[in-house]
Amino acid sequence: MTENDLVISLDAMGGDYSPRVVVEGVAIAHKNNPDIKFLLFGDETKVNEEMKRFPQLKSFCRVIHAPECVRNEDKPSQVIRNKNTSMYMAIDAVRQGNAQAIISAGNTGALMAISKMILKTIQKVHRPAICTNIPHKNGMCVMLDLGANTECNAVNLAEFAIIGNILARHTLGIERPKIALLNIGAEEMKGREEIHQAAKMIKSTHLDLNFIGYIEPHQIGEGYADVIVSDGFTGNIALKTMEGTAKLVGGMLKTTIKKSVMAKIGLPFLIPVILKLKKTMDPRKYNGAMFVGLNGLSVKSHGGTDALGYSYAIDNASKLVRQNFVQTIRDEIEHVDLDELSQDILYDVY
């Protein structure tokens, strides 16, 4: 591997079906990204055994033995300083400059803690956030935080708005994304005080953000906003509620068709529509949540994903690397003093 290679580091032992899904995912992703090289950290014997099914991988993959792995039940405090795990070694490859991004389907809390410890947060960024793209009726939007920070103050939320704005421009190609704060109502007096202060801060930055105010959870799917900002507790609940609702609707549709004679008769006419909807709503397409705000790109794949889903995580990570996403955040956040701005707003309030 040369200095100019695009290299992605993989925690080959992370996830419910590793290392099989990781290796298969690499094989799929390579078809669309033939220039990417991979570092696979994990049990050398197990990883190489899986790679026998894909002999072409040897030309662009390097397997690096890791004697231990992070289990799903491990607490972050138990593994954060264990340098012998596949997760730690994969993240450290980014710090050392041997890779431009790291992907793991393993323990989310551990990945967040180790990534933050090794890669550090970008200067002026107080907290990193978990972020991903989610579908709505007109396309997709960016949503953050989805679980990294259960409690956030106004500064954190304003930072998430700035980072989300950058992400929407890069991943969705929207020149001036519409930004909204997730709240229990659209009226200005609704919600907690930190949300009100965050709204004032977002309006006050010289970055000319396209802030449209508050958005309620039921409006997420309507496509009103391109960037939806929330604390991690609320955002995680909202995301899981959406996922659960999608499964409920899908299950009810299947049950209804099975019980209805007329539905079975009309099924051949509905199949193209159902398949199109299924493709649009396929959660595998949106696999790969990013820890944004770090000095390096760390991506969390869903632990139970299949090979296709893992390949999408690789695709998403490679796009952000090619667009120099981390440096763009550094450049834009450098010109904003949110701490000073928050003091001005608090002074106005009191």
Image (cartoon, rainbow, N blue to C red):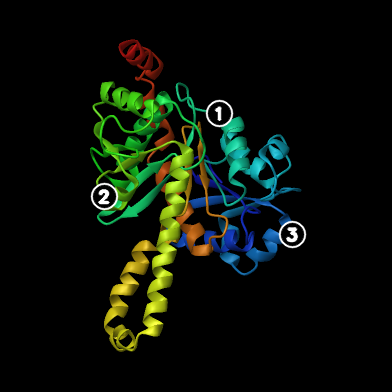
Look at discs 3 and 2 and give the one toward the viewer: 2
Q: Amino acid at mark 3?
A: Thr
| Residue extending farthest front | 189
Asked whether 244 or 31 is in front, the reply is 244
Q: Is residue 266 above or below residue 124?
A: below
Q: Amino acid at mark 2?
A: Gly
Is the Cβ of the residue at disc 1 closer than 8 Å to that at disc 2?
no
Dot 2, crowdedness within 10 Å: few (<14), some or many (≥20)? some
Which SS class for mark 2? Answer: loop
Marker disc for residue 76:
none
Is the Cβ of the residue at disc 3 closer than 8 Å to that at disc 2?
no
Determine the CA span between mark 1 and mark 3.
32 Å
Task: Return the residue at label 3.
Answer: 45
For the C terminus, the image quarter is top left
Task: Return the residue at label 1.
Answer: 120
Q: Residue at x 51, y 36 (%)?
A: 150
Look at discs 1 and 3 and give the one toward the viewer: 1
Which SS class for mark 1? Answer: loop
| Residue extending farthest right | 67
Marker disc for residue 223:
2
Q: Amino acid at mark 1?
A: Lys
Asked whether 264 or 312 is in front, the reply is 264
Which SS class for mark 3? Answer: helix
Determine the CA span between mark 1 and mark 2.
34 Å
Determine the CA span between mark 3 and mark 2.
47 Å
Asked whether 2 or 192 is in front, the reply is 192
